[in-house]
Amino acid sequence: MTHYFRKYGSILLRGWLGSLLIALLIATSFKSAIADWYIVPTGSMKPTILEGDRIFANKLAYDLKLPYTTFHLASWDNPSRGEIVVFRSPADGTRLVKRVVAVPGDTLAMSDNRLYINGEALSYAFSDRKGGDPSLTDDGERQLYTEDLTGHKHAVMVMPDRQAFRSFGPVTVPDHRYFMMGDNRDNSADSRYFGFVDRSEILGRATAIVISLDMGHHYQPRWSRFFTRLQ
């Protein structure tokens, strides 16, 4: 009887472990190649994305990659100006979330936080969009604007009293490269510091906030931000 339980118990255990490994492989492959969500720990994309937002990334937005690699099996689109993307930093491979401000072939410059694309200055207007964060008040330390990124209007924030990289260029974006910036223009480590991002390092398009928890107030839910579309 003992021999019977050992024999069939071993078979059941191997079957259970095999099923578990297959399930894990399917789940991780889905996250690697199709869709995933990310916790945003910093304020570099304020006021669009706040610390504690969990964002959904569509990894099929531009292409299909071999799971666990950056090898492209098929491609059907490329990031456009204004889209928010998830990518690996050229500096250290860290996954980052930033906005595409210039695409291959664009000539980009910035003068005192005003962007110029292909010689044309972008337009800016004062904004009261606080993104559900009461700390985002126009108090002189933080100023909110709506930036018209060649037809894609979105919120940006500047911090005039903070030392920051506010002017550069002009630079021309090489083939297969992209220039990324955070919406929190004076508090974002982006392409101004680590350079252009290769197309192969772009993992997907960030499309929505799934859940938002206020990290500064005991992770209380920000209900108004649940299931909201990113712009």
Image (cartoon, rainbow, N blue to C red):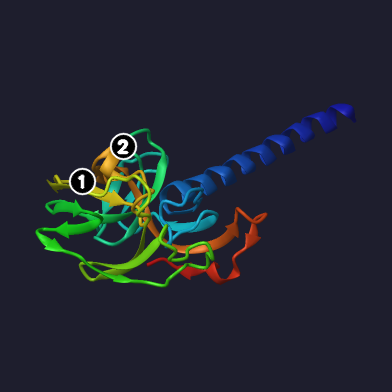
Q: Which residue is mark 1?
A: 177
- SS for dot 1: strand
Residue 46 location, x and y as percent? 43, 58
Q: Is residue 108 above or below residue 143?
A: above
Residue 138 visible, this orientation: yes
- Residue visible at 66% across and 38% down in the picture: 17
Q: Residue 90 — which label?
A: 2
Q: Residues within 10 Å of mark 2 (few under 14, many from 20)?
A: some
- Between residues 200 and 191, which one lies in front from this camera angle? 191
**In the image, farthest residue toward the top:** 3
- Residue visible at 65% across and 56% down in the picture: 217
Residue 172 visible, this orientation: no
First in sequence: mark 1 vs mark 2: 2
Q: CA distance from mark 1 to mark 2?
A: 11 Å
Q: Amino acid at mark 2?
A: Pro
Residue 170 location, x and y as percent? 12, 48
- Residue visible at 41% across and 72% down in the picture: 128
Quarter of the image containing the N terminus?
top right
User: Based on the displayed image, in which of its 4 quarters is residue 124 positioned?
Assistant: bottom left
